[in-house]
Amino acid sequence: MRLQLLLAPLGWLLLVETKGDAKPEDNLLVLTVATKETEGFRRFKRSAQFFNYKIQALGLGEDWHGEKEMSAGGGLKVRLLKKALEKHADKENLVILFTDSYDVVFASGPRELLKKFRQARSQVVFSAEELIYPDRRLEAKYPVVSDGKRFLGSGGFIGYAPNLSKLVAEWEGQDSDSDQLFYTKIFLDPEKR
C-alpha cells in the first residue's frame, strides 16, 4: 500500500477560527518536540489546553544538536517521533498531529482540525511553504501546484498513526541531520509518496 502524502499550508490545519470545543477528541493526539520549557512552548501548551487538545511533549531535557553553525538539524525530532510512534503503530483510527511548538499556537479545536484533515482525503498531510529548504537543487523535482504553496515543510504534519509510523520507519540519520530533507526525499519519491 502506497503512502499518500499531501502538502497544505500549516495555517490551513491549525489556524481556522471556530468556537472552543467542549471536550478533546479521543482519536487525536498531538506530539511535539520541546527540549526546553521556553515561553513559546508554554504559550503552545496554554493554547492546546484552551482548545482541549491532548498533547505529549517529547525530548524535554535533551540537548538540541541542530540549527547551529553548518548543521541543518531536526533529526532529533524524527528520532523521538519514531520512538513515540512505536506504541501507536497499530492504532488505525488514531490521528496524530506532529507540530513544532515554540512558534505555534492553536486557534481552533480538535473537531475542526480533524474535519479539515479528513476533507484532504489523504493518509498524511504535511504543511507547505513558499521557499524550498534545505536543498534548492530539489526544486525541479517538486510537482507544480496551481494554488497554495509548493514546498514541503516539516514544521507540522498530520496522519493516521500506522502511516506516520511507516513514514519514519526508515529513519537512520543523526540528530543533527535535516528532518525536512528526510521528509522531502520521501515526498519526492513516487514509490513512497
Image (cartoon, rainbow, N blue to C red):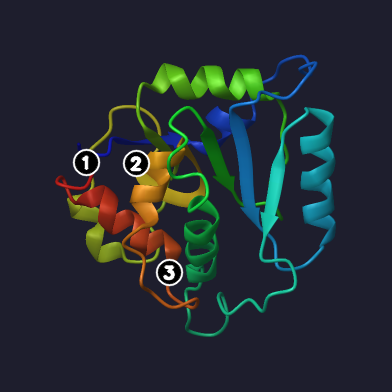
From the viewer's side, name the closer residue of 133 and 56.
Answer: 56
The label shown at residue 143 is: 1
**Is the N terminus in the top left, top right, bottom left or bottom right quadrant?**
top left
Q: Position of residue 112 (x, y in %)?
A: 62, 18
Q: Position of residue 31 (x, y in %)?
A: 62, 48
The label shown at residue 178 is: 3
Quick one: label 1, few (<14), some, or many (20+) residues within 10 Å?
Answer: few
* Dot 1 or dot 3, earlier in sequence: 1
Of the two numbered discs 3 and 2 in the rendering, the one whose residue sits closer to the viewer: 3
* Dot 1 or dot 2, earlier in sequence: 1
From the viewer's side, name the closer residue of 35 and 72.
Answer: 35
Q: Position of residue 51 (x, y in %)?
A: 78, 27
Marks 1/2 in contact by CB < 8 Å: the verdict is yes
Label 2 element class: loop
Residue topped by disc 2: 150
Quadrant of the rendered structure where residue 96 is? top right
Residue at image coords 52%, 32%: 94
Which amino acid type is marked by label 1? Pro
Label 1 element class: loop
Q: CA distance from mark 3 to mark 2?
A: 19 Å
Of the two numbered discs 1 and 3 in the rendering, the one whose residue sits closer to the viewer: 3
Is residue 18 rendered to the left or right of residue 152? Answer: right
* Dot 3 or dot 2, earlier in sequence: 2
Label 3 element class: loop
Q: CA distance from mark 1 to mark 2?
A: 7 Å
139 over 147 or under it: above or below:
below
Q: CA distance from mark 1 to mark 3?
A: 21 Å
